[in-house]
Structure formats: structure tokens, C-alpha cells
Image (tube, rainbow, N blue to C red):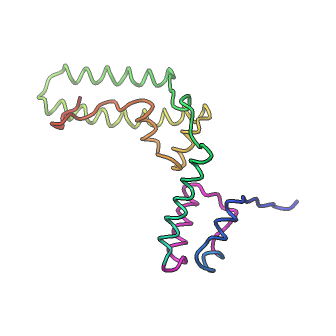
């Protein structure tokens, strides 16, 4: 059985557009252009793209953005909905612990420090739960965040589960 490698028309266009012969030789049309593939391509262009490599990198970025816009590569709102029982339990647990700090003993500064630490821990938990849950539902937004194609897991969690606390203009947690 032969090991068949696949490519796309886009990869062939990118290879043909490379600014130098060395860059054309180095570009692998079989490598997916996910976050890692894009990073390798940019690094290769910096090394082998010649004096105008930075301009070529910008042109490719613009081409990718324009193509995504042209084909309507967007995500439905359902990609961002996380009404899971696990998320609700994490938020309830967080609220209980935050209220204990807020209504407990200690100075305002001590309470802010405690709330900051608690919030940091729970933001990480919410981020992971959110990404796992949405990925499990086949969310394109979660796939893009996981690979770094658009955004990242923290931005996805911020947009889908709202930050647990923020700072006011005085730097105090609210």
C-alpha cells in the first residue's frame, strides 16, 4: 500500500508565490498550515525568503484574512454557548468562596489579594472546562482557539463565560 500525501490548491499557490527558489524548495505543500505550520513557514521565510521576506509574510497574512472573509469563515452563536452543569457547579463554588472572603475578617487589601488569587485559580478552571466542553460539542470556535487559528482558550472563555472578576479604576477587584 502506498503512502499517499494530499495537498490543496492553496498550498500550490503559496509554493508558487514564494519569493526565492530556496523558499520554494523549503516549503512543504503537504504540511497543514495550522498554528505550528504557519510558524514554521514564517521562520523559513525569514531564513530563505530574501530581502523582501517581511513583505511576503505580510502579503500572505492579508491573503489568508481576505480568503477567510470571502468564504464567510465565521462561527454560529451556538459555538459559544456553555450551559453545562459542570460550568454551573464551578461558578457556584467560586461564588461561595468569594463571598466567604468578602464577608470574612481582614483588611480591604487582604481581601483583594485573596479574591485575586481565588479568581486566578478559577479563571484557569473555567477556561479548561469551557474549551473541553465546547470542543466536545464540535464547536468550530473552540477548535480555532485550541489551534490558535483565531484567538486562544483564554479569549474564548472570556467571551463565553465572562471573566469572574475585573478591576475598577482604582485597581480593586469588583
Residue at 27% x, 36% y is 117
* 40 falls in the magenta region: yes
**Residue 131 image offset from top left, x and y in percent:** 51, 36
Image coordinates of residue 35 in percent, x first then y, are 54, 55
Q: Residue at x 51, y 76 (%)?
A: 47
The magenta span reads: 26-51
* 2 to 173, vertically: above or below: below
Residue at x 48% of width, y 32% of height: 129
User: Residue 163's x, y, as percent?
Assistant: 35, 32
**Would you say 58 lies left or right of 23 here?**
left
Quick one: quadrant of the N terminus? bottom right
Picture residue at 43% right of the left edge, 21% below the top: 89
| Image quadrant in which you'd find residue 116 | top left
Task: Name the foreground residue: 100 vs 130.
Answer: 130
Question: Residue 111 occupies which quadrant of the picture?
Answer: top left
Q: Which residue is situated farthest in the front direction here?
A: 70
View extreme (right): residue: 1
Report the quarter where the C terminus lies. top left
Amino acid at each position: 500500500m502506498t503512502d499517499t500525501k494530499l495537498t490543496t490548491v492553496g498550498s500550490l499557490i503559496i509554493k508558487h508565490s514564494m519569493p526565492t527558489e530556496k523558499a520554494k524548495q523549503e516549503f512543504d505543500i503537504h504540511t497543514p498550515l495550522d498554528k505550528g505550520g504557519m510558524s514554521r513557514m514564517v521562520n523559513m521565510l525569514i531564513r530563505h525568503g530574501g530581502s523582501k521576506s517581511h513583505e511576503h509574510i505580510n502579503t500572505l497574512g492579508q491573503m489568508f484574512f481576505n480568503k477567510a472573509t470571502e468564504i464567510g469563515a465565521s462561527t454560529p452563536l451556538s459555538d459559544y454557548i456553555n450551559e453545562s452543569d459542570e460550568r454551573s457547579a464551578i461558578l457556584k463554588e467560586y461564588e461561595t468562596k468569594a463571598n466567604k472572603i468578602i464577608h470574612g475578617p481582614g483588611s480591604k487589601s487582604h481581601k483583594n489579594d485573596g479574591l485575586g488569587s481565588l479568581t486566578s485559580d478559577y479563571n484557569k478552571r473555567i477556561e479548561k472546562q469551557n474549551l473541553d466542553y465546547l470542543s466536545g460539542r464540535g464547536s468550530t470556535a473552540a477548535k480555532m482557539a485550541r489551534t490558535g487559528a483565531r484567538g486562544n482558550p483564554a479569549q474564548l472563555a472570556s467571551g463565553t463565560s465572562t471573566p469572574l472578576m475585573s478591576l475598577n479604576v482604582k485597581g480593586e477587584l469588583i
